[in-house]
Image: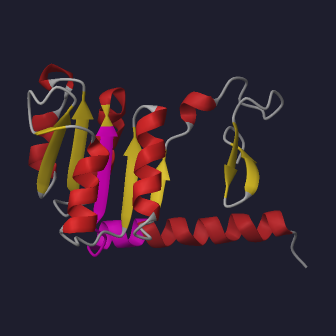
């Protein structure tokens, strides 16, 4: 009998294979949400959706929104949120997300969020209300990368996990 860790790894691998398959062969609709320095890594996600994603980009002001033209070429739609209202909606990316998913009832297979910790937290809380699977980047939590220091400890699904090794 396999250990629970082996079963979890197999389940994760199965989900990853399904995600990549659907991404490459056309029926996956993602909602990339990028804030500040999290915008560049989101571009890779947008590129592989072949124009089937709606990107939400956020920043303090219009001059902080980078790669906007690249996203416009790679996404079906690009929505902008700035704190000062200098471009797009005045407010937070979560407000745009709420409008899309909550008010307009748009359906997405997954939300992928990369940006400041607070943004990712509130994106995850907003998508949880709608049962939208969400992946966030926890790279900034790592210190030693071995699981020894415990700085990257997070609770996921009621279980303690270590970002750097799990």
Q: Can residue 47 be seen from the camera position used here?
A: no
Task: Say if 126 sits above or below 85 in the image.
Answer: below
Residues rendered magenta in the picture: 20-34
Q: Position of residue 14 (x, y in %)?
A: 58, 72
Task: Residue 92 in the image: state x and y as whole percent.
Answer: 27, 39
Confirm whether the magenta stretch covers residue 25: yes
Q: Residue at x 29, y 73 (%)?
A: 25
**Left or right of 58 in this view: 124:** right
Question: Is residue 116 among what the camera can see?
Answer: yes
Q: Based on the displayed image, in which of its 4 quarters is residue 26 positioned?
A: bottom left
Q: Position of residue 147 (x, y in %)?
A: 79, 35
| Quadrant holding the N terminus | bottom right
Write the residue at 8% across / 27% down.
Answer: 86
The answer to if 5 sits in the magenta stretch is no
- Count the labels in the image: 0
Name the residue nearer the viewer: 124 or 141: 124
User: Which of the pair 88/136 is nearer the observer?
Assistant: 88
**Which residue corresponds to the image point at 21% horizontal and 59% vertical from the top-left?**
99
Picture coordinates of residue 65, whole percent (x, y) = 19, 28
Left or right position of 100 against 34: left
Q: In terms of depth relative to the viewer, which is nearer, 5 or 64?
A: 64
Residue farthest along the right direction in this orientation: 1
The quarter of the picture where residue 100 lies is: bottom left
Could you tell me which residue is drawn at 30 percent across and 33 percent down? Answer: 40
Horizontal side, residue 17 vs residue 75: left or right: right
């Amino acid at each position: 009998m396999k250990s629970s860790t082996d079963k979890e790894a197999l389940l994760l691998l199965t989900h990853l294979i399904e995600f990549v398959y659907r991404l490459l062969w056309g029926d996956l609709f993602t909602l990339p949400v990028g804030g500040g320095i999290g915008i560049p890594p989101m571009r890779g996600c947008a590129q592989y959706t072949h124009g089937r994603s709606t990107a939400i980009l956020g920043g303090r002001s219009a001059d902080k929104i980078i790669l906007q033209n690249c996203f416009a070429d790679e996404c079906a739609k690009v929505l902008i949120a700035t704190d000062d209202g200098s471009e797009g909606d005045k407010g937070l990316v979560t407000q745009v997300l709420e409008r899309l998913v909550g008010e307009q009832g748009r359906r997405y297979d997954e939300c992928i969020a990369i940006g400041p910790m607070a943004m990712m937290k509130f994106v995850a809380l907003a998508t949880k209300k709608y049962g939208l699977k969400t992946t966030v980047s926890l790279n900034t939590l790592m210190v030693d990368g071995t699981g020894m220091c415990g700085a990257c400890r997070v609770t996921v699904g009621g279980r303690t996990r270590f970002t750097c090794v799990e």
